[in-house]
Image (tube, rainbow, N blue to C red):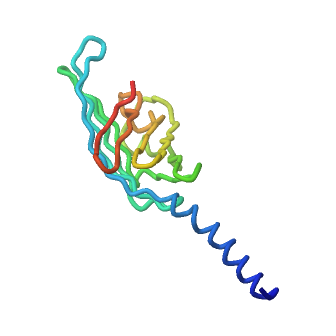
Amino acid sequence: MTAKRRRLWLSALALATVVLPAAAQQLDAHFSCGQQREQDGLSTVYADSGAIKVDGTKIVEFYWESSIFRSTHGLECSIDQGDGLQAEVTGDASWRFSLQDAKGARAKRGYDYSHGFNCTIRVERVGDNVHINPSCPALCGSRPNFTELSFDLKSGDCHYED
């Protein structure tokens, strides 16, 4: 192999190692989950639906509605791209989503009391399983946070964390 061919081959190999991990940094997921369980002695229904489509740090689509219903009242959280969402890649198949201006997003929704202005949602894909771990009280009105959950991309099966 000539020196020129070796350089071209090494350049192609270096390019392939740069491009291959990027494919793992893509996610296209839609979910709809629900579960009824006992909480604090009350029958409680959890309901979540959303879509996450991300290519590296580019958010193509993101929305999530998370609700808790009891016989006397219901509480909800929601987030979407209109809230000033940004994405950070934290691993081969994991992201950290946050708000550019959490205080402004909360005020835009008309919430006049504070649960704090932090908002991060960690999303990790392992095989066909996607785990969503939220810490985003800024967009939850009177509710402290979204509900932590996992779902299977192929079967649609959901699991709520306790």
Where is residue 101? Give x, y as percent. Answer: 52, 47
Q: Is residue 134 above or below residue 31?
A: above
Observer-nearest residue: 32 or 138? 32
Which part of the image, by quadrant, shows the C terminus?
A: top left
Observer-nearest residue: 120 or 101? 120
Q: Is residue 91 left or right of residue 31?
A: right
Q: Quadrant of residue 21?
A: bottom right
Residue at the top extreme of this rendering:
41
Q: Is residue 2 left or right of residue 149?
A: right
Q: Is residue 158 above or below residue 101?
A: above
Where is residue 9? Give x, y as percent. Answer: 71, 80
Q: How many marks?
A: 0
Q: Is residue 35 above or below residue 96?
A: above
Where is residue 87? Give x, y as percent. Answer: 52, 53
Where is residue 46? Give x, y as percent. Answer: 27, 31
Residue at the front extreme of this rendering:
1
Q: Quadrant of residue 3?
A: bottom right
Which residue: 44% across, 33% down? 137
Residue at the left extreme of this rendering:
71
Which part of the image, by quadrant, shows the N terminus?
A: bottom right
Which residue: 27% across, 39% down? 33
Which residue: 35% across, 31% down? 160
Which residue: 40% across, 44% down? 129
